[in-house]
Image (tube, helix red, strand yellow):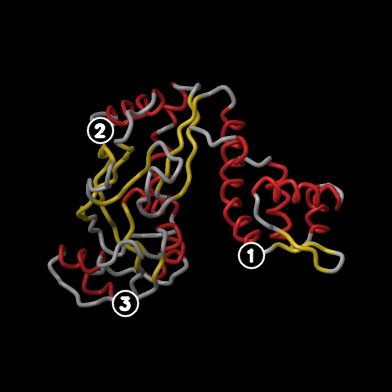
Amino acid sequence: MIAPRRFLPSISSLLALEAVDRRGSATAAAEELALTHSAVSRQLKTLQDQIGVTLLRREGKGLTLTPAGIDYAASIRDYLQDLARASLKIRAAGEQSSLNIAVLPAFGTHWLLPRLRAFAQGNPDITINFATRLSPFDFTREPFDAAIHFGRADWPGATHLELAREQVIPACAPSLAGRGSLTPQDLPALRLLHLETRPGAWEDWFARQGCPAGHLRGMLFDQFSQMAEAAALGYGVALLPAFLAEAEFAKGRLVPPVELPTEVDGAYYIVWPQISPPGRPLQKLLKYLQLGQTGRP
């Protein structure tokens, strides 16, 4: 249920308040909004009267926001951004249905997008929008229909469909690998690169090769793409998912210092909220991805 009209100020008055807070004066806000100073002042007075709280005060010839006005401006800023994003999405989709999916950047780029070409061609009435999220979030607070999750099938309040198991491959610049054959024991001397969201990944990899290592230090990154770029520049050896490593090997930017692709714990899932059944566009995407588990889409 929408709140009563008396609690819903006009967009123009909210924009005026946000602009005054961000730009620091009604004059600067008026220039940004292509309004006169008096028009901005009227918008603010109307908003103040409607809310029933003093939002601004006059200092000399100008207007400044009260602490209540500053707090209110900060609160409405996110809502104005959400409204702008919603309008952009509907404008981009036009008459089509849309799906909003939160993706892990490397998996979305190198695994998911190539597999969705046939889906997009076969479903021209559905537009898929992607946004990066590196960790789980609350579906009730984020406007996503589904998300890509790595790890276990443990996203609270979500239904899971497994998409792919994880296989990792060491990768480094050709100049760093040299010409001789290397062993896992040689890799720490080449410097190891680490991913923030995969603590202990290298230790686990060494253990699986039968040569447990102690605590391994090195540069830390928050995305695989950054780590792959650092590896290509010679900063060290990255432990990359096969879908990203193989793409870099094909370009010649990276090489495997040891030929040891290794499957590790964890899988990639597409997850969606349990609170309501998936809509028609998401149902079609899930069916397409399920078929891809027995025969690639």
Q: What's the CA distance linking mark 3 and mark 2?
A: 37 Å
Tell me the number on the disc at residue 273. Answer: none
Which of 6 and 206 lies nearest the eye of the viewer? Answer: 6
Image x and y of residue 273, in percent: 33, 38
Return the residue at label 3.
217
Return the residue at label 1.
67
Res. 297 visible in picture? no
Position of residue 82 in the picture relative to residue 14 (left or right): left
* Residue in the image at 45% along x and 32% along y: 99
* Few, some or many residues within 10 Å of mark 2 (<14, 14–19, 20+): few
What residue type is disc 2 on?
Gln
Task: Using the image, determine if residue 28 lies above or below residue 95.
Answer: below
Label located before the other in sequence (1 or 3): 1
Q: What's the CA distance linking mark 2 and mark 1?
A: 56 Å
* Residue in the image at 38% along x and 43% along y: 139
Identify the secondary structure beneath mark 3: loop
Return the residue at label 2.
293
Q: Are marks 1 and 3 in contact (CB under 8 Å)?
A: no
Can you tell which of label 1 and label 3 is closer to the viewer? 1
Image x and y of residue 12, in percent: 72, 43
